[in-house]
Amino acid sequence: MKIFAPRVPVPGHGGSASGSAPGVSPPASTAVRSYRPKRFSRRRVLRRNLRNSVADCAAFSIMVGIGETYFPAFALALGLGQIVSGLVASVPLLIGAVLQLVSPYAVRWLGSNRRWCVMCVLLQGLSFLPLVGAALAGYLPAWALFGFVALYWAGGLGATPAWQTWMETVVPFHVRAPFFAMRTRFGQAGVLVGFLAGGLSLQYGKQHGIVLKMFAAIFAVAFVCRIISARFLSRQTESAHLNGPQLHVGFGELLQRIRTGSSERLLLYFLAVQVAVQISGPYFSPFMLGQMQISYLHFVSLLAVSFLAKIVALPACGRLATLFGARRLLWIGGIGIMPVSGSWLYASDFWQLVLIQFLGGIVWAAYELAMLLMFFESVRKEERTSILTMFNLANSVALAVGSIVGGCLLKLLGESREAYLFLFAVSSFARASALLVLKFFPGRELALRDEVLDAEDEVTSMTLSREPSSLNRPEVDEPEGLTGPARRMATTVATAEHA
């Protein structure tokens, strides 16, 4: 059956919405013209926003693959040593996490999440220029390298909380899961393309004795990609009304909420997983290259398999999140990543590693997509910038703690093959233990909150058009024979397919 929303009278046009005399019905063609352009205008704005968001993600991901990935290798090429090469992946990250604590105050001062987000993205892109100069000059002290990479992380981490708060007003709830699955798929492809392009460029530079010049080239490409990303970010709309005032949540208040079982307890699970993963994560590369003695070609191939698995799995993950919710997808991903590191104990040849990497890529795709969606659902919009800023700092500390624990265990056990395998087993056990935190996560609060998200979607759609006539709603096909949640699910799937 058809559902018609009542027309809203337009001021200055008498009592009828079309401007005709009272009591006289307007012609059908006039009625269609009165709302169709506005409906299509709202749809065009939404589609333009989504296209710009995907393009931003693709450009950003290429920057990560061709730039960020090769910071440790750049330290080695400069002759700064293995210790500096290892520390450049963690120390600047911690410094950047401290610097990004200004984000909530900056957003309130600017009055815009978009402005702060674009400014941080530009800072992150500009941080590559000194690295380009250092690569051409052939010299950069360790403290300067740490400083420039810290600026890179400060820009990236500073943009993230504001971006997530902003994106809730850009991407409607009913298309959020399939859209972010598709967007993340483009992102994984971009990281893979950037990683392969950077690796091939450096291999060419090594063969011809121009490694540092190749570093200058790939960092220049990373800079250009991030500037392009900033351009696409700036082209997305922002509604000041929907953003609303940003509330500050102190560290003590956040801890109190976690202790009392609020939805923010989910952040504790993410931190526990980060520690568990980092116990083994940084040591897979030395295990493959040092203990297993695999070639660089096989090493790159194994990394590529993981990216390809995520690209293949993300559409299905998006559908699962749409039909069953992000929380259930998080459980699937959380359970799936548990045995991934431990399965390396039973791998004896290259093809077994390929299978492990492919299966690991699938479950990591589910976990990462669910993590992104749960940030939208578990943290209140008006508090998200403040809370996620503190989470970024805590996440960086968790990363460092996990790496230190893994390094200490490896050093204590003698850096043998058996020591690496024990490390991987410990990581799997720690990931399983983290599920206890997720088990006590209060999902009922989110279920109640989801009931009002559809209503918020209507407000989002209306504010995309400034004319009063944009309040006129078009016809909506309501599925026959469906009631309650089943009807909402069918409408959600249909909308996602046409967005």
Image (cartoon, rainbow, N blue to C red):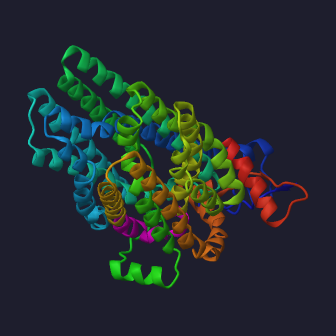
- The quarter of the picture where the N terminus appears is bottom right
**Observer-nearest of 268 and 3:** 268
- Residue 411: name its quadrant: bottom left
* In this rendering, position of residue 62 left or right of residue 461: left
Using the rendered view, name the quadrant where residue 452 is placed.
bottom right
The residue under the point 46% across, 35% down is 303
Residue lying farthest right? 481
Choose between 477 and 262: the one closer to the eye. Answer: 262
Residue shown at the point (38%, 74%) measured from the top left: 247
Residue in the picture at 67% in, 61% down = 8
Task: Tell me where the magenta segment starts and ends, as one range.
Answer: 375-392
Residue 141 on the magenta span = no
Residue 435 lies left or right of residue 227; in this view the side is: right
- From the viewer's perspective, tell me whether residue 385 is left or right of residue 411: right
Q: Position of residue 154 (x, y in %)?
A: 26, 54
430 to 163, vertically: above or below: below
State the residue lying farthest toward the top.
208
Residue 481 drawn at (x, y percent)? 91, 58
State yes or no: residue 388 in magenta: yes
**Looking at the rendering, in which quadrant would you find the C terminus?**
top right
Q: Main secondary structure of the magenta part?
A: helix
| Count of numbered marks | 0
> Residue 321's spot in the image, x, y percent?
65, 55
Foreground of the two, 375 or 76: 76
Q: Quadrant of residue 142?
A: top left
Estimate the x, y position of residue 275 in percent, counting from the top left: 40, 62
